[in-house]
Each structure stands twice: as structure tokens, then as C-alpha cells.
């Protein structure tokens, strides 16, 4: 897959989660699109105002200034170089109401994380990029096994367009941060800081999706739901910590 128009396209990628940012930057490169990648909303705002980008790819939960606010400020600044650039919202929230709200605030399209190379290509087409339709290896369509594996290599490779090097790099990055994330989430739950715990779990789920860490993604999702419902938290925390420890032990 290669971009035919515009020639020499450059997009701004704003994503604070390291694994997600590296994956998306590599995926854009695979699609023939150059990107400037930043991890902070304020930096994204400065870049978008100073340079004319062909598109803005904005995560919704950026520190400093969230994606919606970044887009709003760029659109309202008559002197912003990227004022007219189409914008793609990056979010793990697949609620239809959220999608409509984002479209209403000025985003041209919404992409749900974790996102593979082909879904990213479709999102770029929605922004007006002309991309060949040669798809990367398809994701598995058969039903999952009853016992979820710690790693799903097939899903990870499908998301990475079949590039094993990208998968290995993302897993190394994820495991490097996992011990600290595990401790932070456990501490937040212990002190009753539900918002912090859910925010950390949200970030971790995106990384798990890109890396194929399906078991940990499932237990993180279950813990998020338990925290929201304020029910079954102790059990879900135990399962989550066990799944995190399994990955960490395998990396030791």
C-alpha cells in the first residue's frame, strides 16, 4: 500500500502512549506517509499552528491539552498553518455516541484503538488520502480457544501488517513499562483512586492490543468494568495482577 496523493504527505501524530505511538508511526511509514510524532497536547498544538500538515491524527487523552481541545484551538486560530487540515480522532472508546460527538466537534473520521495497518489505511482514505487497497495479512477469523493465550502472535502480526520486527519491538517496549504500570494500577485501586486506575488501564489496553497481549488486555478490560460498576473489584484485581506477572516472568 502506498499513498499516491498528496505527494510527500506529512501528518502530525499526537499519541502519548509509547507503544501506540511507535506502532502508528511505523504503520504510517508502511503506508508511505511521513509523520511528526509527539506525545503531548501542548506540543501538538504548537506544531499544528506552526506547520501545514496534510492531516492531524490526535489521541483524545493527551496530557497538557486533549485531542478535542487541540483541534478546537487550531480551528479557531486564523493564523494556524494546519487550520484546514482534516483530523482523525484516535480513541479506545467505540461507543456510537462518542463517535458522533467527535464528528460534530470537527473530526473528519474516528479510529478505534488498537488499530491495525489496514483499518488505518481506511481511516486515511476517509481523510482524502489515495492509498492502494493491497491489504496486509488478514486477522484470524476463527473463534478463540477457551483458554486465552498470554500472547496472540497471529493477531499481533496482522495488526503490524505481517512485520515481525515491529511486533518484537513493541513487545519489548511494553514489557519495559509493564512492571511500573502494574504497580501504579494496584496502588491506585488500593487507595480508591478509580479515575487514575481506569486511565492507566485504558493506556495499557491499547498497548496490549498492538502487541497481541490478549489475556492481559482481557483482564484489564474486566478490571475497568469492575471499577466502573464498583463490584467484583478484588477478584478482577487479582486476575489482572496474575496476568501481568505471567508476562513479566516470561520476559525475565
Image (spheres, rainbow, N blue to C red):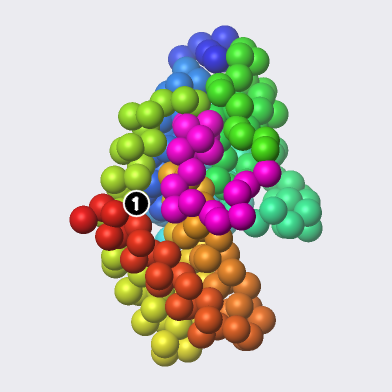
> Considering the image in quadrants, where does the C terminus appear?
bottom left
For the point 51% across and 65% down, the residue is 220
Provide the residue span drawn in magenta.
Answer: 143-160
Is residue 82 part of the magenta span, yes or no? no
Q: Is residue 67 left or right of residue 35?
A: right
Q: Position of residue 144 (x, y in %)?
A: 62, 47
Q: Residue furthest front?
A: 146
Vertically, is 129 above or below 160? Answer: above
Asked if residue 82 shows in the view, the reply is no
Q: Determine the image quadrant of residue 137.
A: top right
Residue 98 vs 173, above or below: the answer is below
Q: Under tag 1, what secondary structure? A: helix
Q: Residue furthest left?
A: 252
Q: Is residue 238 above or below residue 107?
A: below
Q: Nearer the viewer, residue 148 or 75?
A: 148
Residue at image x 78%, y 54%?
96
Residue at 51% across, 35% down? 154
Q: Is residue 80 left or right of residue 181?
A: right
Amino acid at each position: 500500500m502506498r499513498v499516491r496523493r498528496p505527494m510527500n504527505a506529512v501528518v502530525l501524530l499526537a499519541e502519548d502512549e509509547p507503544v501506540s505511538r511507535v506502532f502508528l508511526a511505523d504503520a504510517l511509514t508502511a503506508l508511505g506517509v511521513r509523520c511528526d510524532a509527539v506525545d503531548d497536547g501542548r506540543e501538538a498544538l504548537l506544531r499544528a499552528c506552526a506547520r501545514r500538515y496534510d492531516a492531524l491524527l490526535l489521541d483524545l487523552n493527551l496530557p497538557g491539552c486533549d485531542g478535542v481541545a487541540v483541534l478546537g484551538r487550531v480551528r479557531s486560530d486564523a493564523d494556524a498553518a494546519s487550520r484546514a487540515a482534516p483530523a482523525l480522532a484516535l480513541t479506545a472508546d467505540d461507543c456510537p455516541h462518542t463517535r458522533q460527538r467527535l464528528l460534530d466537534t470537527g473530526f473528519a473520521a474516528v479510529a478505534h484503538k488498537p488499530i491495525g495497518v489496514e483499518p488505518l489505511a481506511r481511516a486515511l482514505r476517509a481523510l482524502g488520502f489515495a492509498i492502494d487497497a493491497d491489504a496486509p495479512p488478514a486477522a484470524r477469523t476463527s473463534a478463540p480457544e477457551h483458554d486465552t493465550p498470554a500472547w496472540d502472535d497471529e493477531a499481533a502480526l496482522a495488526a503490524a501488517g505481517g512485520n515481525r520486527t515491529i511486533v518484537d519491538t513493541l513487545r519489548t517496549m511494553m514489557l519495559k513499562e509493564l512492571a511500573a504500570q502494574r504497580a501504579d494500577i494496584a496502588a491506585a485501586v488500593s487507595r480508591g483512586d478509580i479515575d487514575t486506575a481506569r486511565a492507566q488501564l485504558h493506556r495499557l489496553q491499547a498497548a496490549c492490543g498492538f502487541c497481541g497481549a490478549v489475556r492481559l488486555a482481557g483482564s484489564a478490560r474486566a478490571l475497568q468494568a469492575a471499577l466502573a460498576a464498583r463490584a467484583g473489584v478484588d477478584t478482577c484485581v487479582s486476575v489482572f495482577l496474575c496476568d501481568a506477572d505471567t508476562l513479566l516472568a516470561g520476559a525475565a
